Amino acid sequence: MRSGTPLGGLKPRKMVLAGTSMSAGTLLNYLPAHKVFRTPDMQRIYDGFYPTSNGSLVPDVDVPVVHMPTMLEVSAPNITDRADSDEPGRQYRLYEVAGMAHIDTRYSVRLKPNPCTQPLSEFPHEAYVSVGLHHLLQWVDKGTVPPRAERITRDNDEQNDGSRMALDDHGNPRGGIRTPYVDMPIAKYGLRPPAITPVIPNASAYVAAGGQNAANQMCGLSGTQIPIEPSKLQAMYKTPKDYAASVEKRVKELEKAGWSLPIYRDVILSDAQKVRF
């Protein structure tokens, strides 16, 4: 790839390796080899790494790493506690997005129709995974040091609210990378809804082929979106127009701080404009 042959003669300036969930595990397994394998002219093969939907400890490597666990990993007892670093040979950022589930339930064809017992999250995964990738690319290509993010707050007490995360009054995580979906909430974003038993008769091809095991697996990796009652929304925001305006204001603040990309502004604002109460 460094030669440019697969790219029609174009020579890549920088190359990063990304993976999510199981493929993020493969990425982490590759890291010891990264220290050994080199190009024919003894240069690094990859200039950065981006594991997502994975909470394992990332070992030190000689290129920047941006690491993005989701709420599922943050809720586990063994989530990494590695500190951010700008030190050469230890360049690392951990980005935890409040409201993000392990898999993208907004678009997954495996979850249409919904085989789970609760409404699935419409959180726009791609709008925030792209934030981490953007900062990694700027880091490896231009040397732009990325911002540090607050971690999702954990209380490690599942008895009080069923979560190891510390939740706010609406049931959403405190701390982490903020988004309008949790700062101006219309729903509680949760995890691991049980699958409907028996499997729904019109399930997706994947769930139908795998039966109850497939339904249990997909629902166990999913995020939920439990709506806040319309009367509460009215008390919180007065009118849908006021709500949309507050979301637009927050999006601009997050863009300025580096936690939202302008390319996804229309997606987020469109979600806000659809809200009715």
Image (cartoon, helix red, strand yellow):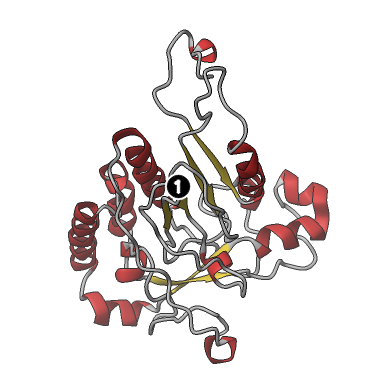
Which amino acid lies under the numbered mark 1 shown in the image of this protein?
Gly
Q: Quadrant of residue 232?
A: bottom left
Compare residues 88 and 19 and report the one nearer the observer: 88
Q: Is residue 119 visible?
A: no
Whole-percent x and y of residue 123? 44, 58
Compare residues 68 and 42 and report the one nearer the observer: 42
Whole-percent x and y of residue 247? 24, 62
Q: Is residue 32 above or below residue 253?
A: above
The mark total stands at 1
Q: Quadrant of residue 170?
A: bottom left
Whole-percent x and y of residue 154? 48, 79
Q: Quadrant of the N terminus?
A: top right
Query: Label 1: which residue?
Result: 89
Q: Is residue 259 above or below residue 242?
A: above
Q: Quadrant of the C terminus?
A: bottom left
Identify the residue at horizontal 26%, vertical 52% (top origin).
258
Identify the residue at horizontal 42%, vertical 62% (top origin).
97
Identify the residue at horizontal 51%, vertical 68% (top origin).
81
Neighbourhood count class around disc 1 (C-alpha, 10 Å): few under 14, some 14–19, many 20 upward: few
Whole-percent x and y of residue 128? 40, 52
Q: Is residue 195 visible?
A: yes
Identify the residue at horizontal 17%, vertical 60% (top origin).
249
Q: Is residue 16 above or below residue 236?
A: above
Compare residues 196 and 159 and report the one nearer the observer: 159
Judged from the image, the secondary structure of the residue bearing numbered disc 1 is loop
Question: Horizontally, is 195 left or right of 114 in the view?
Answer: right
Question: Horizontally, is 173 left or right of 219 in the view?
Answer: left
Given the current orientation, which residue lies at the most extreme bottom position? Answer: 160
